[in-house]
Structure formats: C-alpha cells, structure tokens
Amino acid sequence: MLLSERCIGCGTCAKVCPFGAPTIDESAKKCKKCDFCYDLIKNGKNPACVDVCNARALDFGELDDLKAKYAGAKSVGGGTKASTLIIKKSFHLCKNFLQSVL
C-alpha cells in the first residue's frame, strides 16, 4: 500500500525494492507503484502489461484458475508470498553456442 500523502519522494523505496515495483514520478516528486491497473481489472479487463506483452509471457487471474490453466507450474517462494507462477520451459542450444557467442 502506498500512502501518497505521506510520500516525500526520496526514492529509497525504489532503490531497495527487489522487484522494481515503486518508481519516482519526477514531475510530481512522489512515489508511484504498480496497482495492477486497478481500474482496468475493476472493469473486467487485464492489466495493460498482460495485453501488450508480445511474447505472451504474462497472464493474470485468480491464482487457483491460473494453476489449473497451467498445470505443472510452480509457485514462486519468497518472503512476500507473491501470487506468481513460473512455468519451466526447456529450450535447446546448438553444441557450439558458447564458442559462437564468446
């Protein structure tokens, strides 16, 4: 929760957040934070990031629905108890990949 009226715009929260969620609005000199596009969700739409992701790497919904939709996905652990699922994808590199990029 961001209490905007208390924010002094120092930027400390943005510097220490491991997820990069808070940022500083330079024009307002206040912190702003992702609210998962609350107004869009309230109207039955996805957060903007989900709809614009060209790789379709993001999805949004109730955690139980996402777990059912993406069977085999793993819940992300951590101190924040984020409702995030990770789907492991396997990919193959050519045998000489490291030599070709180094």
Image (cartoon, rainbow, N blue to C red):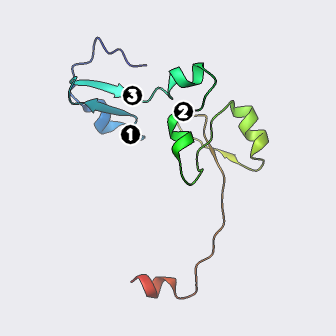
Q: Residue at x 21, y 30 (%)?
A: 26
Instruction: From the viewer's perspective, tell me whether residue 48 is left or right of residue 70.
Output: left
Q: Residue 45's quadrant in the figure? A: top right
Q: Which mark is residue 20?
A: 1
Residue 74 pos. (x, y %): 68, 47
Q: CA distance from mark 1 to mark 2?
A: 17 Å
Whether pointer 3 and pointer 1 mark residues with C-beta atoms closer than 8 Å, the reply is no
Q: Nearer the viewer, mark 3 or mark 2?
A: 2
The amino acid sitting under disc 1 is Gly
Q: Nearer the viewer, residue 80 or 59?
A: 59
On screen, 64 above or below 5? below
Measured from the top left, where is residue 91 in percent x and y?
63, 70
Marks 3 and 2, Cα distance to the nearest angstrom? 14 Å
Q: Residue at x 38, y 39 (%)?
A: 20
Residue at the spot of label 2: 47
Q: Marks 3 and 1, how far apart in space?
A: 9 Å
Residue type beneath disc 2: Pro
- Residue 49: x %, y % from top left: 50, 40
What SS does tag 1 mark?
A: loop
Q: Amino acid at mark 3?
A: Lys
Q: Check disc 3 and report the residue beneath it.
A: 33
Label 1 neighbour load within 10 Å: few <14, some 14-19, many 20+? few
> Is 28 placed left or right of 45 in the picture?
left
**Secondary structure beneath disc 3?**
strand
* Quadrant housing residue 34: top left
Mark 3 or 1: the one toward you:
3
Q: Residues within 10 Å of mark 3 (few under 14, many from 20)?
A: some
Q: Residue at x 45, y 88 (%)?
A: 99
| Mark positioned earlier in the residue sequence (3 or 2) | 3
Who comes first in sequence, dot 3 or dot 1? 1
Decide: is 89 above or below 36: below
